[in-house]
Amino acid sequence: MMLDLGKNSLKNISLRSASLIILVFFSLTGCWDNKDVTEINLITAVGVDKTTDGRVEVTFEIPRPSLTRTGQAGAGGGENSREKAVSLVSSKGDTAFIAVRSMVEKLAKDIFPSKMELLLIGEDLARAGLQEVFDLMERDPESNMTAKVLLVKGAPVKQVMEAESEQEKIPSLHLVKSITVNQDTFGSSKEARVIDILREVALPGKDPLIPVVEILEEKENLKVKNILVSGSAAFRGDKLVGYLTATETRGWLLAENKIKASVYSLPSPNDETKNISFEMYCENGQKKVEFIEGKPKLVIKIKATGDIGESQEPTDLTQPQMLKKLENKIKQIITEEVNSALNSAQKYHSDIFGFGDIIHRKNPQEWQKIKDNWPEIFSKAPTEITVEVKLKRSGYTRKGVEPL
Amino acid sequence: MFSWLKRKYKFLKTMAQANQQKNEQPQAEKIPQSFPELRAKLQQVFAECGDFKTREILVGDEHYRLIIAWMDNLASNQILHESLIRPLLEPQAFCQFLEDKEEDLAVFLKNNVLIAAELKEVTDFNQTVEFILCGESVIYIEGSSTALAAATRGWETRTVTEPETETVVRGPREGFVEDLAVNCALLRRKIKNPNLKMEMMKIGRQTKTTVCVCYLKGIADPALVQEAKTRLQKINIDAVLESGYLEEMIEDAPLSFFPTVGNSEKPDVVAAKILEGRVGIFCDGTPFVLTVPYLFLETLQASEDYYTRAISSSLLRTVRIICFYVSILLPGLYVAFLNFHQSVLPLNFLLTIAASRESIPFSPFTEALFMGITFEILQEAGIRMPRPIGQSVSIVGALVIGEASVRAGLVSDPMVIITALTAISTFILPPLQRVLPFFRFGFTIAANILGLLGIFFFLIALVIHLCTLRSFGIPYLAPLAPLSLSDIKDTFVRFPLWTMLTRPRDLTWPETGQAAKYRAGAEQLLSKMRKKEDR
C-alpha cells in the first residue's frame, strides 16, 4: 500500500519527517549515562568526619565484587587469602563535595553512590551540624536517600569503618542489618534514614534521633563484634546535643510505637536472687499534648502485652495475684524507661518525640504562639506517662520443672 | 530507498502484467479423429517425456482401434490393468455393441465396459493432456472426437504420520501429507457436513498446482471466502511448490514482521479454525495448510489447549504470554539495567553481576549481540544439518561456545543464562520463532541507546504497528483491540468449553455482523486513502 502512493502524498512526507525526527532524537540523546557495571565503583558506605583543622574528611567503603561473591571459592581459596572484600578510600576537602570529587585521584573508576547503604557521621561533624553533608545528599540525584545513618561516638569514623565482619563480607551491611533487627526485637538502637533525618531537621516541632556506634575495645584487627551499636544521639535541629542510653532509646521506641518486641527481666517476687524475664509485644504507644490553662502537658500512653519468657525458679507464675504483681513491676520498669528518655530529651532541649509537631497539627493557633521558644517550653513542660501491662501467656508450661 | 523500491515494484508489476497477457489460456483444440494424426500430436506434445506411455489395442473383433495414454507411476498400473485393459479385452464385451451399432462407442464404453470409478467424456485435446499429467488415463477412440478420461490416479504417497512441527501430548496424532486428495479426506473425516465446501482451482503457470479453498458454508463470512478466492485467482506466478508461495502472494502485510496468514500441519487444528469461520487453503504437494484470517492471539494458542482441562491450559496460555515478553525483552532489559539503571537493582544482585562481569572485556550490549547471533547460528545449524551429525552441533554449541567462552572470560555467566532462557522461550511460540529475533535485537539496540526509555519507545512502536495490521479485513489484535468482551473467553484464559456459547464474533457470520463492521471500516479507510492519492 505504502509503495503505491504518489510522490507528494501526505503520508510520504510524514513518514520521512517521522524517520528524520527519530534519527535526530537518537543522535542527540547520545549515551550520556551509559555506564557499564564494570566501569563504576559501587559504594556501600560513606563516612564523614571533621578533621582538626576544620576540613571535611570523606571515607568510602568500596566492595570488590569478585571477593564479595559467595558460594564459589575464589582462585587460591578465597577465605584463607585474608584479602578484605572491601577497600576504604578517604579524601579531604573544604566541603564534602570537593572531598568526594577529589576521590577520583585515588580511584581507577568512577564513583557510583546510588547503592550506598550506610552513612557514618563523626561526632565532631555532628556537633558542628549535619547540614553541610546532608545538603550534598539532597542535591545529588545519584545519592541514596534511604541509606541508614549511624553516629560514631568517641572515635574517628574511619576506625569504625575498618572493623571487619565475620558474617557479612561487607561490614557496613552487617551494621545496617543489625540496626534493623535490634530496633524490631530488642530496642537498644533505632533506625534512622537520611530522608527521615532531613525531614526532622526541617520540621520545627521535631528533632532527629540517630543511633550511635562506639568502639568497645581497642584492638589491632578490629572486628564488628568489638564495636557496639547501642543507644542514640539526640539532636537539636541539625546539631548534636546529647546521648540517650540503650534503655532510654527503648523508652523512646515504646513511645513512638516503633518496637515489635522487647525483653525485660526482674527479680522474682518469691526469691529475690532469681530472675524472671518477659517478652513484651503488641506495644502500642500514643503521644498526646494536653493544654492546661494554655500550658502544654506532654502525655504518653503505652499499652503492652507479653509472655513470660523464662523463670529461674519453679513457681506457678500464672496465678492471678502473681500476674498482677509481675504486671505492676513491668509497668514500673517501662514507665521509668520512658520517663528517663523524656527527661533526657527535656534536659537537652531536643524534641525527639515530636510533641511540637503534634501541637502544630492539632492546635495550629497555639503553635503559632509558642513555636519561637518551643525548646524552652518543651524542656519545662509537665509530663504524664501511663502504662498498661497485660501478661497473657506463659509459654508451653505454667510452672517450671522442680529439681528434686 | 523507498522511492527506489517503489520504482522497482512498479516496473516489475508492469512486466508481470505483460507476461500475464502473453500467457492466456490456449484455445480449445479438437481431438484428431485419425490415429496417425493423433499419434503425431501426442508425440509432439510429449516429446522426450520418458514417463509417457501409450498402448494401442484393438477391440470388438478388431473393428475398433483405441489408444490408451497415461503417465507411468502417476497412474496406477494395477488400476489401469484391472479397470480398463482387462474389460476392454474381454471377448464378450463388445457383443451387444456389435449387434446394435446404434450407440456411440465412447458412450457404450463408458456405460457398459469400463469399470473405473470416474469416467469423463472429453472433446478438447489440451484437456486430455492435462488429465494425463494429473495421473488419469485417457482412452482415444479412432474415428471419434470424444475421448474418455478414467480416474486411475495411484502414485506413491507418504503415509499419514505424526507431524514433527506440532507435536502434542494429548490429541490426534495424524498429520497432513503431500497429497491433496488425502488431505481433503482427512478434513472431511473431521467435519461430516455437506456445508463443508471445497472449491478447487489451479494456480501456477508451469506447475498447474491444485489449490483447494475450504470453508464451512453458513459459518464463514461469504465476503471473506470471496476475498480469499479473489486473492488466489489474482496470483500469477510460474510455480506453487509449497503453500508458502501462496501465503506470500495473498498476505495483507508483506513487509511486516508478523504473519497474517496461518499454517498448520494437523487436520484437527485446521478443522477447528474452519469451524470458527476461517477459510482453509490446501495446496497440493505440501502438508502445510493455510488458514485465513490469522490473528495475533492465534500465535499463543495451541490445539492442546482445547483437549486438556481449562485450568491447566489457561496456565499454559499465561506462560506463553510471559515467554513472548521474555524472548523479546530479556536481553534488552539486561542491557538497560546494567548500563543505565544500576541503582534499581538490589545491592547483592548488582555485586554478583559485577563480580561475574569483572574481567569481561565487552560491554553487555556486545555480549548480548554476540550470544544472540551465536544462538541463531546454532539453531540454523541444528535444522539444516543431516541427522547423523546432530550430536556434534550440540557438543560444539554447548561445550565449546557456552562453556569455553565463559571460561575464557569472553562472556559472563548471567549472559549465558539469559541467552538460554530467551532461546527456550522462543521455542514455545513456533509461529513467531522466525520473527522474535528481530525484535530481540531491536530491543537490545534501543536499550543500549536510551535504556528503559528506549525499550518503551520501541514497545510503543511495536504495539502501534500491531494495531495497524489487518488480516483479511479483521484487525490483527482482535478481540483485544478493538475489544470484543464476549470473545475474551479464548484469549489469556481459556474458558471451559461449556461457557463458550457463541462463535467468535470477529469472524463468523451472520451471528453478529461484527465482521461486517470491520469490513466497512476498512473500506472507508481504503476509500479515504484513494481519495488522498487522487489529490
Image (tube, grey):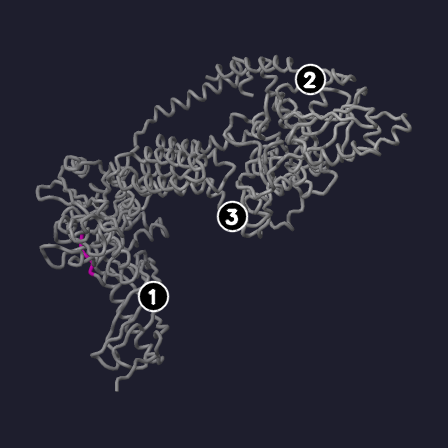
Q: Is residue B472 above or below residue B36?
A: below
Same subunit: marks 3 and 2: yes
Q: Which is more foreground, mark 1 or mark 3?
A: 3
Q: Please, which residue is most extreme toward the bottom here?
A: A404
Image x and y of residue B301, in percent: 55, 42
Same subunit: marks 1 and 3: no
Q: Residues within 10 Å of mark 3 (few under 14, many from 20)?
A: some
Image x and y of residue B456, in percent: 42, 34
Q: Is residue B170 above or below residue A334?
A: above
Q: Residues within 10 Å of mark 2 (few under 14, many from 20)?
A: few
| Residue drawn at 29 percent across, 65 percent down | A262
Q: Which residue is mark 2?
A: B25
Name the quarter where the N terminus of chain B is drawn.
top left
Which of the chains bears the disc numbered 3?
B
Q: Which residue is mark 3?
A: B316
Q: Residues within 10 Å of mark 1 (few under 14, many from 20)?
A: some
Residue A143 visible, this orientation? no
Q: Which residue is mark 1?
A: A281
Residue B81 visible, this orientation? yes
Looking at the picture, tell me which residue is in the foreground, A40 or B65. Answer: B65
Q: Is residue A56 above or below residue A172?
A: above
Q: Is residue B82 left or right of residue A171?
A: right
Image x and y of residue A339, in percent: 25, 64
Which of the chains bears the disc numbered 2?
B
